[in-house]
Amino acid sequence: MPVYSEKVMEHFMNPRNVGEIENPDGIGEVGNPICGDMMTFYIKVKDNHLEDVKFKTFGCGAAIAVSSMTSEMAIGKTLDEAMKITPGTVATQLEGLPKNKLHCSNLGAQALRKAIEDYLNKNRAQGGGKND
Ligand code: FES
């Protein structure tokens, strides 16, 4: 049995920002090849900031806590700042994860990054930001 920090347990029991955003500006979906778990992040962007972030995670407790923490860390940040969120910074904010659960922490930052890239790609395709 892995021993989770109180912070992990708290985010697992009360995950923040669970759900879907209607008409999101970006979507990022990732799967964990080790366990087959899945995570999707939805973002709403305004003035180059993440106005809202929501997620759906079909995964273990650590993955749910990681998604919750990643979303909390991301909301309000600029896109550049949010791109700098890493599995390591998320795990640190969660006061650590058991070694055999560290792979679960990769999903959050990856899914968030993908959602931001999705937004940037769409904007590029449109030839400019719709929030300009
Ligand atoms: Fe699948 Fe943790 S065991 S993400």
Image (spheres, rainbow, N blue to C red):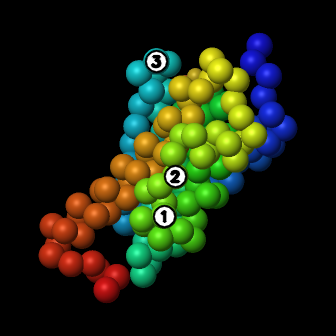
Q: Secondary structure at mark 1?
A: helix
Where is mark 3, residue-wise? Answer: 34
Quadrant in the rendering for residue 10: top right
Q: Is residue 31 visible?
A: yes
- Compared across the picture, whether 48 is left or right of 129 comes to right
Quadrant in the rendering for residue 75: bottom right
Question: At 71% from the left edge and 35% from the top edge, which residue is drawn?
Answer: 96
Q: Can you tell me whether the CB of the residue at mark 3 lies under 8 Å from the nearest atom of ligand 1?
A: yes
Do tag 2 and tag 3 residues touch (Cβ < 8 Å)? Answer: no
Q: Whole-Å distance between the Cαs marked 3 and 1?
A: 28 Å
- Compared across the picture, whether 68 is left or right of 128 comes to right
Q: Secondary structure at mark 2?
A: loop
Answer above or below: position of 92 versus 78.
above
Q: Whole-Å distance between the Cαs marked 2 and 3?
A: 22 Å
Q: Earlier in the sequence, mark 3 or mark 1?
A: 3
Please name whichever residue, 99 or 119, is drawn nearer the observer in this view of the structure. Answer: 99
Where is mark 1, residue-wise? Answer: 81
